[in-house]
Amino acid sequence: GAHFGKKASAYAIDCEMIEVYMPDGNLQRAVVSIGVVDVSMEVILYARVRKPANSVVVNDTFVKTAGGLSADYDKGLSIFSARELIQRLVQEGAIMVGWQIDNDLKALGMDKVVPSQQIVDLTTKFTTTNGHKCKLIEAYRTVFRRNFAAHNAGDDAKVTMELYHYWNEAAKGKIVKIDLNFYCITWHYFKLSSTGLSRGDVLWQYLRPRTNDREVVLEEDDGKNAYKLKFRQKADRDAYMLLIKRRLEENNIHPQGKPQRVAGGRGTEMNFGFFRSHLYEIVR
């Protein structure tokens, strides 16, 4: 950590973005809100940022659900005002801290402006056991053993600053390993000839999760045998299993026999006659 022990001030930055078509037909990310937080956890800027003039919104799914912004993207600061503030901080030698901060800087049009030695991307400082990237909330939950409710870019920037302090002070600038699993279930051994149902019917009617939000679950389907769901949290897999149990019982499909330990005791297999389920965990 080149910044460890240095007294340069640091600011955490977070932007919320939407995708827009520009008047010239180009698809690009536009910033619609920005949060900047200083080392004493004070929000020094939280503002709406108006989208580029005459641009057309293509995708704002993330903002509405997590950010809670109502969909008037023509109000707020101009992007130039936000840029000016950050430029001033950078010129003063401040360190800009973010979670995948390259995305934020790029959307602000500042990716070429901030010297790399003044950037700390926390996704490279907090990684999974196997060295993969994780999500902001996953790092935060694991480190601080509590959840956070992020309602806007100001909240996300605060959380980012808390993790920066932890990395700088408790971890002394070393990489922090975040101990995470995927909680998996694979459905396989489909034997459907007697049912008149196709594999697709079964997935759709019985086995699909309630959400396809990638923050919650990742779906992998080989189209032939294995249909795999990887949940980020055990509680979400438990809820999914209850939902499936109810759907199957309503259609008179019941487990046959007792659950079997498989994979050297690391997994559990259940036979439902027409298909089987395999529950297991993988270290991320």
Image (cartoon, grey):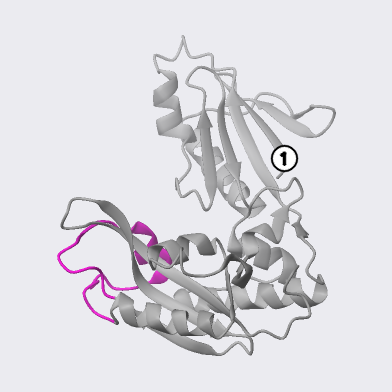
Q: Image quadrant for the C terminus? A: top right
Q: Residue furthest right?
A: 264
266 vs 31: above or below: above
**Residue depicted at 85% across the width and 28% down the height:** 264
Q: Image quadrant for the N terminus? A: bottom right
Q: How many marks?
A: 1
In percent of width and height, residue 57 lies at 23, 59
Which of the two residues, 177 or 121, is positioned nearer the viewer here?
121
SS category of the residue bearing label 1: strand
Please state the extent of the stretch shown in magenta in the rendering.
50-76
The verdict on residue 177 being magenta is: no
> Mark 1 packing: few (<14 Cα in 10 Å), some, or many (20+)?
few
In percent of width and height, residue 233 lies at 63, 53
The verdict on residue 51 being magenta is: yes
The amino acid marked with disc number 1 is Ile
In percent of width and height, residue 130 lies at 75, 45
Q: Is residue 182 left or right of residue 240?
A: right
**Residue depicted at 53% across the width and 42% down the height:** 218
**Residue depicted at 59% across the width and 63% down the height:** 136
> Which quarter of the picture shows residue 32?
bottom left
In percent of width and height, residue 39 lies at 63, 86
> Which quarter of the picture shows residue 167?
bottom right
**Residue depicted at 49% across the width and 48% down the height:** 214
Return the residue at label 1: 282
Q: Is residue 49 left or right of residue 274?
A: left
